[in-house]
Amino acid sequence: METTFQEALIRPVTVTMDGEKKVISALDALVMRLLDAGIKGDIKAINSIFDRIERLIGSNRQQDTETSAEDIEILQRVLAKREFSGLTDDMVKLSDADEETDGKDLVLDEREEARD
């Protein structure tokens, strides 16, 4: 059953994005639809997205990783530049245009839907 599910998720499907037909994996199409629903305000989709993010972050935290000296130096330089520029998290805001979707709706090609 696992193999069948994996094969179904990597199966190519044709979608229409911004008026162009593209071939992507079924998994990519599902993720894009979930994100699109969340952006449009679907509470179930939003909760599902955040649940998955939390699980991914949790699994990444479980991996024992060390920050190299080089990484620490890079982080210190970035933080110093941020402090120098005077930007704070409170000053960085999204404009209304950034919050709206840009009309990139995902539509499965009718022929693909008919096959499913």
Image (cartoon, grey):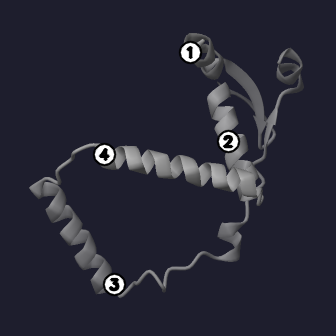
Tag 4–tag 1 contact (CB < 8 Å): no
Mark 2 — residue? Answer: 32
What residue is disc 4 on? 62
Query: Looking at the image, do the residues carrying marks 3 and 1 touch, with CB atoms under 8 Å apart?
Result: no
Q: Which of marks 1 and 2 is nearer the N terminus?
A: 1
Along the horizontal axis of the image, is 93 left or right of 45? left
Decide which of 32, 53 is in the foreground and name it. Answer: 53
Circle 3: residue type: Ser
Cα separation between marks 3 and 1: 51 Å
Marked residue nearer the N-terminal end (4 or 3): 4
Residue at 60%, 11% (x, y): give it. 1
Q: Position of residue 79 (x, y in %)?
A: 26, 74
- The foreground one among 18 and 80 is 80
Q: Which is nearer the N-term, disc 3 or disc 1?
A: 1
Image mark for residue 85 = 3
Mark 2 falls on what kind of element? helix
Earlier residue among tags 2 and 4: 2
Give the x, y percent position of residue 39. Answer: 71, 57
User: Is the residue marked by circle 3 packed among few (<14), some (14-19), or many (20+) residues within 10 Å?
Assistant: few
Coordinates of residue 53 in the picture (x, y in percent): 51, 50
- Mark 4 neighbour class, 10 Å CA radius: few under 14, some 14 to 19, many 20 or more: few
Q: Is residue 2 above or below residue 19?
A: above
Q: 5 left or right of 54? A: right
Q: Nearer the viewer, mark 4 or mark 3?
A: 4
Q: Which of marks 1 and 2 is in front?
A: 1
Residue 2 — which label? 1
Q: How crowded is mark 2: few (under 14 residues within 10 Å), some or many (20 or more)?
A: some
